[in-house]
Amino acid sequence: MRKELISDATLVSHYINGDESSLEILIKRHKQKIYSFIYSKVFDRDVAEDVFQDTFIKVIKTLKRGNYNEEGKFLPWVMRIAHNLVIDHFRKNNRMPKFDNGGEFSIFSVLSDNALNAEKTLIKSQVEHDVRRVIEELPDDQKEVLVMRMYNDMSFKEISEKTGVSINTALGRMRYALINMRKIIDKHNIILTN
């Protein structure tokens, strides 16, 4: 069977088992879609190239570590990695993403970043205050997992080891924490915009 016809899932498992050429096929197969997605967010060819490279470095590291378990959904998984790296790029450069108004005039193109930053800082601190208030209302076990995950950037494996519960329990608590936060936000009519 020609390699071009093999499914993503099979190519991933071939690559994990040492067949380097399988990754090349995967990259060729999805390059256009992933690159276009990144470019549509950053509007800069050099940055898009960098993020694209970083995406596949992360993909390779994750596959090599044996941490891939997406059951054949390779492209959505890579897109999520790319999306997170785009967000990291904007965070690092502390700039707002450009708004695509389909070529129409945009107020953001004439406002300096500084004018936006003062308001952004104010909104951000209000949002952070509201989020902290919401988190305080969560049951302790859910609050603990949420804080470890969101603020301490711990993996579910690390959370599981630290709290002495299974990874599934930690995931469950995180899910319930998010569901409960949504309920608390609705109850208090808190508007979280940033």
Image (cartoon, rainbow, N blue to C red):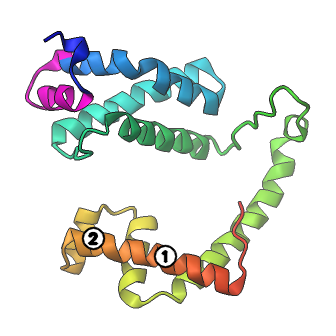
Residue 10 lies within the magenta run:
yes
Which quadrant is home to the C terminus?
Answer: bottom right
Classify mark 2: residues with Cα within 10 Å, few (<14), some (14-19) or many (20+).
Answer: many
- Could you tell me which residue is drawn at 30 percent across and 34 percent down? 59
Task: Name the residue type under label 1.
Answer: Ile
Task: Name the residue type under label 2.
Answer: Ile
By secondary structure, the bulk of the magenta-drawn segment is best described as helix
- Disc nearest the viewer among 2 and 1: 1
- Could you tell me which residue is drawn at 59 percent across and 47 percent down? 91
Range of the magenta residues?
A: 8-21
- Could you tell me which residue is drawn at 90 percent across and 40 percent down? 107
- x and y percentages locating residue 177 in the rendered image: 44, 78
Q: Given the current orientation, which residue lies at the most extreme top position?
A: 2
As drawn, 10 above or below 140: above
Residue carrying label 1: 179
* Left or right: where 13 falls relative to 40: left
- x and y percentages locating residue 78 in the rendered image: 38, 36
Q: Quadrant of residue 8?
A: top left
Which quadrant is home to the N terminus?
Answer: top left
Label whose residue precedes the other's in the sequence (2 or 1): 2
Q: Given the current orientation, which residue lies at the most extreme left position?
A: 17
Q: Is label 2 in contact with label 1 (beta carbons under 8 Å)? A: no
Q: Quadrant of residue 7?
A: top left
Q: Quadrant of residue 89?
A: top right
Q: Secondary structure at mark 1?
A: helix
Residue carrying label 2: 159
As drawn, 170 above or below 28: below
* Left or right: where 150 falls relative to 9: right
As drawn, 156 above or below 78: below
